[in-house]
Image: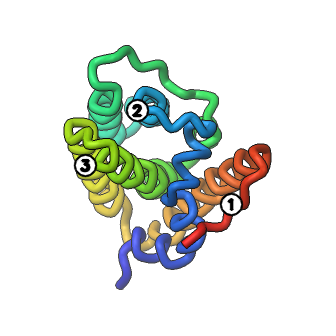
Amino acid sequence: MDSIEDRVRAQAATELERLGSDRGLIALTDADLSAETIRSRLAGALAGVGTVYEGWASEDETFATAAESAHELAATAAAGDDVEPATDHPLVSTLGDVEGRPARVGAGLIGVPLVVDGWALQGVSFFVNEADETAADDCREIRAGLDDLLAAGEDAVSESEGEAAADAALDLIAVAYEDYVETLADMGLDPKTVC
């Protein structure tokens, strides 16, 4: 039986590839490819997601642990700077509207890590090119933490709930992708990955 992650990756392969491309980082930062902006945007998204998890934590211990992890990853991204949760980012605001435990697990612990991992991967590449190994290592640490969230998501739903979780993850990825396309279009850029 394929994992939820495998199913989602297969069905959203194109969207995830483009979100995780260098243009994904351009969209995330509104074309401000500075170390400070990359770090702050990653941190803001992670903190925003952590805030949503906190809202669900009273009903589910899985999200209490996930909230703590997300805020730790946000702090890693911010490298000691204050973090303002990006509650208005479509990824975060849409996540906050998800109802039902399987859907929340799918959107929050499968969809979110898959999208943010693409940004963090591009962060690694960016900082390696900038010869900033500390920042590159921070992005690697974020990716490892996102893998942990994915694993928690897989363990948090039963086999019968897997389809609902996968559907919610795909819906969240679609929202992130739509925002990516619209952001690049406003910049006059093609959302298709340039190889």
The secondary structure type at the circle numbered 1 is: loop
Q: Residue furthest bottom?
A: 1
Q: Are marks 2 and 1 in contact (CB under 8 Å)?
A: no
Indicate the amino acid at tag 1.
Pro
Residue 73, horizontal then vertical, whole percent: 30, 35
Camera sees residue 22: yes
- Badge 3 local density, few (<14 within 10 Å), some, or many (20+)? some
Camera sees residue 54: no
Indicate the amino acid at tag 3.
Arg
Viewer-proximal residue, 186 or 176? 186
The label nearer to you, 2 versus 1, is 2
The span from disc 2 to disc 3 (Cα, nearest Å) is 15 Å
Indicate the amino acid at tag 2.
Ala
The secondary structure type at the circle numbered 2 is: helix
Residue depicted at x 33% and y 42%: 130
Quadrant holding the N terminus: bottom left
